[in-house]
Image (cartoon, rainbow, N blue to C red):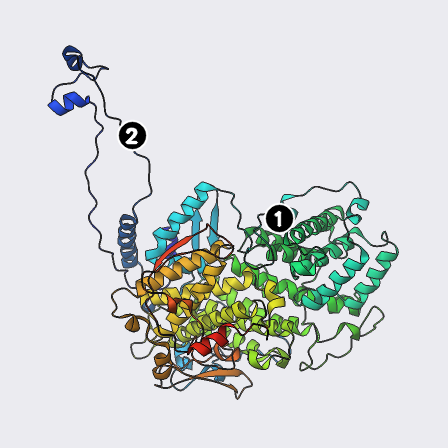
Amino acid sequence: MSLLSDAGASEVVPDPPQARPSPSASRRREKPQLSCNLCRRRKLRCDRQQPCSTCSSRGLACTYADNYATALSLPKPAAMHDRIVQLERLVMSLMPRPGLSSMSGPSPDPGPTPDLGPGLSPVPGANPVPHAMTTPAETAPSAMEVTTPMEVGSECGSMRMSASELRYVSGDHWTAILDGIADLKDHFDQEERFRLAQDDHDTVPGDATSGLLGPRSTPTLLLYGCRLPSSRAEILAALPPKSAVDRYISRYFNRLDLVHSIIHGPSFLREYEAFWTNITSVPVVWVGLLFSMISLALLASDASDTAHGDPEHRSAQIDLYREKTVQCLVIGEYTKSGPYVLETVIHYVYIELILRGDADKDIWFLFALEVNLAMRMGYHRDPSHFPGISPLQSEIRRRLWATVLQGDILISAQMGMPRMISDSKWDTAEPRNLSDTDFDENTAELPPPRPETELTPVLGIIARRRMFVALGAISDVTSAAQPCGYSEVMRVDGILQQAATAIPPPLKPKPLAISVTDTPEVIMARLFITHLFHKGQIMLHRRFLYLDSPSPDEDIFAYSRTACLDASIGALQIQHILDEETGPGGQLYTMRWRVSSIMNHTFLTATMVLCSMLHRGRTLQREDEILRALRRTRTIWMRASSGSREAKKAAETVSIVLARAGEGRGSPEHQYGNTAQNDEQGGGAMSLHQGTQGTMTADYVSTDGSHPGRAGIHGQDMLRQDSTSLGSTAFDPDRFVMPSLLGTFTPPDAQGQTINFNYSPGLDGMGISLDEWIQTNNRFTAP
């Protein structure tokens, strides 16, 4: 990241980084040797001929030293660091302190309050502070404090420029947070330059360790083109037998909760049967929709679920059906936005998203196409404005638009870009909680919605839509080019809290231990919604972590600091749950394909926030908690590093930050402390209860009364029955590693690929007995 972008990106004036002691660089210049070796050794005048006159007159061999051209090399890290530190101090001295700056004008008009759906009302006043988010020990700002004329400067983001690429990300993107750790700039900037020099068109491989797909570098066919078929018959010839397609369609409707609700099941089955009766009776785009459904069913399956049981054969199938999907869209002239086009494009974008282990700009461009198609077809306007649309199509259109809204927030945030859809441009109502059997083509009027206590396939869309409306308001605040007041931040925080309160009861967070009778789809839906809440808290409050309070008597931003820290730790707790339960024998093994780069983006952001806090020493007296979270997430990123460049960078970052956090400390016990002792002395218990306003709250009861945590949704207590301190009894591989023995790591299934971390964690006590450890690490073993 350039220095100018870094200076403009931060509204926080951090403490000047400590310069690392380094020996002064030598100023001596190596001059080339022009005289021959004999003349130089005897200090004689040399005419520099070959041979020279001196050597010729004496009958001696005349030799010259080889002068190799000094290759251009990258600056030494120490010298680079010193220059960065010097320039940063200069920039900081020229920047006005945000807390002391005068008002730059009133807060921008927030505009109309978005529709949050039934049960959600606009937040009254300019400074709502939800009751569930306050505790006696640490309260949100009062009314007078919220309206304090404190302007939060907008974050300009990060700009990277090279000979082959110009890339921008917003200030709340995880890479921008990583760039904020000044000591790591040279390390990763140097790696990035080497990568770009090695291969300007390098694509990120897929996740080779997930068991879903091997490494992939396939192009995005709808963007870059593919071979067109000679006829429609060639496309139809690629279809599997009907018996196989039947199994794929069944798997699609039973496993893919994210997309199958945009297809009206009974209507599709009637079209499906008509297709097999006469394969020319449906438009070619409908055939593309069928191919996309088969592809998604394969992606959500084991290789053992297929006829051949071979992962390579399954990958070849996915490539074939993905290509046929694109061919059908092209032949059907998808830009004319005819029937089945938007459904097929949504499926295709989701296929490309699952196939990639990391964020990919192509997905963002594809999604822009999806948004434009949806708006061209009028999905952004509620069907009630158009009497010609049937009740069946009206309800399906509302579901489709909710899905488009979801992708806008997730993919734009992943790319570090502002969202594409603004609230003032759409008025499509929330879909009703109806089962597909409640209405069909002959329905003259939609029935009233079922109660939200009744779980239907569309209930997940309703819950996610409410969260995404709130996340959209957060995105508008964090990506605004003009500063906004802290009162506006708290107003949007209130919208997020209301969205969390309005989650339907079947999808509210619930401990895994009492979810054994629930389907994996329902459990994953709960985790995904909880992860969205943490994502919003981090996006909204991260910028206040290091911002000085304008009040000398009280820390006005204490609420934001604690909320961001709680959300970061909660997000990594969800990552840990998914890492455990998506393994063989876990409750979510069949849903492991859902842990895509979209969710990993939130985990990456949370990881970088904790790394930044630990690096700056701003841990809010919760350093042990942060260390435990980072050590555990580091292990997860290390395992994923063989198939993800982002995971590799995260693992390296955490390793470096943890290693530096241990410098200058005493014994390993002082460095990390005994886990059991920490739990006894500084730990506490998590209590789950229903708030007075209906919000599920988690109150952290510390034995010493320090750092009480709270959140509308909290991963640390909602996801575990033994809701104790983070990582108190979890297996941590670092505890078995003696100092200086964790220098290298070989990822699973990638022999010969070694990552050097040079991290010395110290010896940590386990805090559990051998029997407990055996039971913990063999709980997936069949009896």
Q: In which quarter of the view is residue 412 placed?
A: bottom right
Q: Residue furthest top?
A: 57
Please tell me whether mark 2 sits on a helix, a strand or a loop.
loop
Q: Nearer the viewer, mark 1 or mark 2?
A: 2
Q: Is residue 377 visible?
A: no
Please tell me whether mark 1 sits on a helix, a strand or a loop.
loop
Where residue 107 sits in the image (x, y, percent)? Answer: 45, 69
Point 72% across, 66% down: residue = 253
Amino acid at circle 1: Thr
Q: Nearer the viewer, residue 694 or 316?
A: 316
| Position of 45 relative to 632 (above/below) | above
Marks 1 and 2 sit apart, C-alpha to C-alpha, by: 46 Å
Point 20% across, 49% down: residue = 23
| Position of 442 relative to 755 (above/below) | below
Where residue 452 sits in the image (x, y, percent)? Answer: 67, 80
Where residue 546 sits in the image (x, y, percent)? Answer: 35, 68
Amino acid at circle 2: Tyr
Give the labeled residue for mark 2.
Answer: 68
Q: Residue furthest right?
A: 277
Point 23% across, 22% down: residue = 64
| Position of 566 relative to 660 (above/below) | below
Where residue 364 sits in the image (x, y, percent)? Answer: 57, 54
Give the labeled residue for mark 1.
Answer: 220
| Quadrant where the C terminus is found in the figure | bottom right
Q: Nearer the viewer, residue 701 or 411?
A: 701
Q: How many marks?
A: 2
Q: Upstream in the sequence, badge 1 or badge 2?
A: 2
Tell me if 603 is positioned left or right of 616 in this view.
right
